[in-house]
Image (cartoon, rainbow, N blue to C red):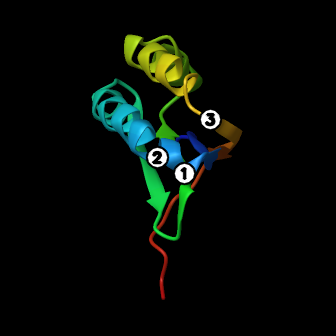
Amino acid sequence: MATTKIVVSGEIRLDPEDFDAAVALIVPLVVATKAETGCVEYDYWVDPRDRGRVRVFEEWESDDAIAAHSASEHMKTFFGGMAKLRISSVELSRFEVSDKSPLKL
């Protein structure tokens, strides 16, 4: 029986001059989050053509795992640091995924 996973995907737009500061906040956040119970996958990627665009991808076992993540100290630190940067937009979407299989090319 397949279990439903929760996927969060989207992007953060920021002033390219704040790129290095954002990466300094993202790296410890990702390391700590990947160690959390219920985290299947969690990462941020930068657009090599646009230093103002950061892609977000998360996969979670449950809403409870996301709630625990949201209340974590490393998220509070991340949000506190990001509040000091020039963020123009954050667009994240939540998906419930009931099936996953390899893409055949």
Q: Residue at x 32, y 34 (%)?
A: 34
Give SS at disc 1: helix
State yes or no: discs 2 and 1 in contact (Cβ < 8 Å): yes
Which mark is on residue 16?
A: 1
Q: Residue at x 71, y 41 (%)?
A: 88
Q: Quadrant of residue 50?
A: bottom right
Binning the other alpha carbons within 10 Å of mark 3 as few (below 14), some (14 to 19) or many (20 upward) gives some
Q: Residue at x 55, y 16 (%)?
A: 67
Q: Residue at x 44, y 71 (%)?
A: 102
Distance between the Cα atoms at labels 3 and 2?
10 Å
Give the percent coordinates (x, y) of residue 3.
53, 41
Which mark is on residue 86?
A: 3
Give SS at disc 3: loop
Which amino acid lies under the numbered mark 2 shown in the image of this protein? Phe
Which amino acid lies under the numbered mark 3 shown in the image of this protein? Arg
Which mark is on residue 85?
A: none
Give SS at disc 2: helix
Vertical order, 16 against 67 (above or below): below
Q: Is residue 2 visible?
A: no
Which amino acid lies under the numbered mark 1 shown in the image of this protein? Pro
In front of the other: 94 or 44? 44
Give the percent coordinates (x, y) of residue 95.
67, 45
Q: How many numbered marks have been drawn onto this rendered protein structure? A: 3
Give the percent coordinates (x, y) of residue 86.
62, 35
Vertical order, 57 against 103 (above or below): above
Q: Is residue 20 visible?
A: yes
- For disc 2, the marked residue is 19
Give the percent coordinates (x, y) of residue 8.
60, 42
